[in-house]
Amino acid sequence: MTIHKSSVVILLVLTGAISAALSGCKYSRSQSPQDVEAGTDGAALSISKMGGGIDVADAPHGATLSTMGGDIHLGIVGEFAKVKTMGGNVTIDHAEASVDATTMGGNITIKGVNGPVHATTMAGDITAHLVGSSSTQRDVHLTSNSGTITLIVPKDFPMEVRIKLAYTKNADKTFDIIDHMGLTHRQSADWDTSQGTPRKYIFAEGRVSSGQNHVEINTINGDVILKQE
C-alpha cells in the first residue's frame, strides 16, 4: 500500500488538533478511589460515580465530587468544595474557601475551613471547625435531621447566631444547646404535632461582636455545641 506524503501531513495535523482540544477540556472523570488524582491543567476537579467511595488527596483548584453511595474524603482543597453522597460519611481535612457538603445518611466532618460552610445530613452528626481570618464574610448553615452538631469558630469570629433544636416526644434522652457566648435560650412550652411526631423546641440566638457572619444551625434529636477556639 502506498502512503502519500499529503496523507501523512493531514493525519499529523488532525492528531495535533485533537490533542490540543483534549488538553483544554475541564478535568472530569469517574473512577475507582484508588485511581483518583487532582488535575494539573489549572481546572477544578470533577468526579461523579454511580457508587463507591471517593478519596482525593489534593484539589488546589476546587472540587465537585458526587457518588450514589459511599464515603467521600477530600484532603486539601482550594477555591471551593462541593461534595454529595446519597449514603456515606463526608470528611474534608482542610478547605481554603467555601464548602457545600450533603449526605443523605452519614456524618459530615470538616476539620478546617477558611470560608463559608453549608452542610446538610438527613441522619448523622456534623462537625465544622472554622479557621483563619475573620475579616471576610463567612456564613455558616448546618442542618441535621437527626444528630449532634458541633461548630468551632475562632475567638474573634463576629456572628449573628440562630439555633433551633427539636426533640421528639419519643426520644430516649434529653438534648441541649451548649455555648459559652451568652446566647439567649428559650424553650417551647407545648408539644408541636404539625410535623407528625410530637416535638418541642429549644432556641438560642444572639450576636457576637459586629454580627458580620450569619450562623444558622438546625437539628432534631441531637445536641448543638458552639464554642470558640
Image (cartoon, rainbow, N blue to C red):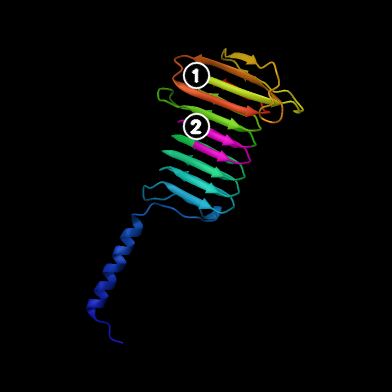
Give the quarter of the figure containing the N terminus. Answer: bottom left
User: Residue tagged by mark 2?
Assistant: 117
Residue beneath the point at 73% across and 23% down:
174
Which residue is depicted at the point 55% across and 55% down? 32
Q: Residue furthest front?
A: 194
What element does badge 2 sit on? Answer: strand
Q: Position of residue 164 (x, y in %)?
A: 60, 23
Q: Main secondary structure of the magenta part?
A: strand
Tell me which numbered mark, 2 or 1, is placed earlier along the sequence: 2
Taking the image as drawn, is residue 20 in sight? yes
Which amino acid type corresponds to the residue marked 2 in the rendered image? Val
Where is residue 36 shown, x and y percent of the image?
A: 50, 52
Q: Residues within 10 Å of mark 1 (few under 14, many from 20)?
A: some
* SS class, disc 1: strand
What's the magenta region?
A: 100-122
Q: Which residue is mark 1?
A: 160
Residue 95 visible at all: no
